[in-house]
Amino acid sequence: MRRCAMKRVRGGFNLSRKISFQSRVWQCQREILGRRISFFARQWPGSVTATCRRSLFIQTAPTPNPKSKKLIPGRPVMEEGTLDFQTREEAKISPLARSVFRLRGVEGVFLGQDFLSVTLSDENLWPEIQAEVFSSISEFYDEGKPVIEDMSATRPNDAGTAILDTDDSTVILIKDLLESRIRPTVQEDGGDIAYRGFDNGIVKVELQGSCVGCPSSSVTLKNGVQNMLMHYVPEVMGVEEVSKGQGGDNNSPEGSDEEGNGGAERGQAEDFAVDKNQVERLKDLGF
């Protein structure tokens, strides 16, 4: 009995020594960490201040474009639609985009519903200014400013996928595929794609956000967008990228007559005729 009691005493003594030793180790680790933070603060005071001021956790996601990153602030960005800014002049209407454009090397800001994409002139600049980008976004949300100063005078990007009365069945299929299957995939990579017309079997689209200037954008158009459209819509012969502002306004009747309907004349019954194969494809897509 005495031996067992002695073992318990010795065991308790050893345990207390282990706890005391571990507490001293943890204290030393905290001191070392504090010294490192102090050294870092003296060397780069701006970066430490920006990191400490952040009030939200901003997630980053890589994109196929090495110059661009998708940033998810965990807060709503656009209530509806998207906005793509390629210059500082365009960004004047948005306090959020304007604050990011003030940073060195920023040449593009794209605003989605729950994310924004920032594109730099050089991918090697990201390690240098990523903390500043985070700080600008955090300060914007801390100040409670609107994303767009005058939303009534600002028109979000027109994706061109709204179904019009003048659209024939082929254009309806193209628009639905873009809206329901292609755009969500492209937006996951921090970009967007907009319908800009259908003429002589060629679908015209505009790339936005991280897709602008992306080295793999041509591969995405040919192997992704073009293959899917040609698979579901036999009338499609190919896909062509157009620059911003080209292709006309596809949500207006005037723009639809020229490109949205493939150059068909308005009012002719054959423009709106739907054959049996097109009806089946419409049913498959939920129409």
Image (cartoon, rainbow, N blue to C red):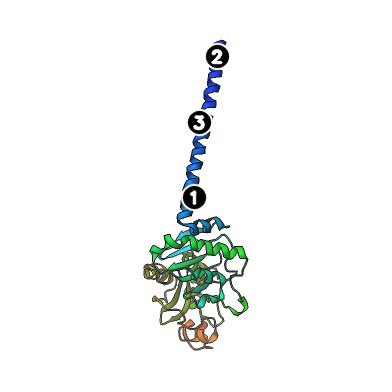
Q: Secondary structure at mark 2?
A: helix
Number of the front mark, 1 or 3: 1
Taking depth in this image into account, of 233 and 135 the one nearest to the observer is 135
Number of the front mark, 2 or 3: 3
Residue shown at 56% from the left, 73% from the top? 94
Taking depth in this image into account, of 10 and 263 the one nearest to the observer is 10
Is residue 243 in sight in this rendering? yes
- Residue bearing the label numbered 3: 21
Q: Where is residue 120 shown, x and y percent of the image?
A: 43, 68
Residue 283, which numbered label?
Answer: none
- Residue bearing the label numbered 1: 38
Structural distance between the alpha carbons of marks 2 and 3? 25 Å
Residue 102, relative to residue 48: is it above or below?
below
Residue 10, relative to residue 227: is it above or below?
above
Taking depth in this image into account, of 155 and 6 the one nearest to the observer is 6
Q: Where is residue 264 shown, x and y percent of the image?
A: 47, 86
Sequence-wise, which precedes: disc 1 or disc 3? 3
Query: Which quadrant of the figure contains the N terminus?
Result: top right
Structural distance between the alpha carbons of marks 1 and 3? 26 Å
Residue shown at 61% from the left, 62% from the top? 142
- Residue bearing the label numbered 2: 4
Q: Amino acid at mark 3?
A: Phe
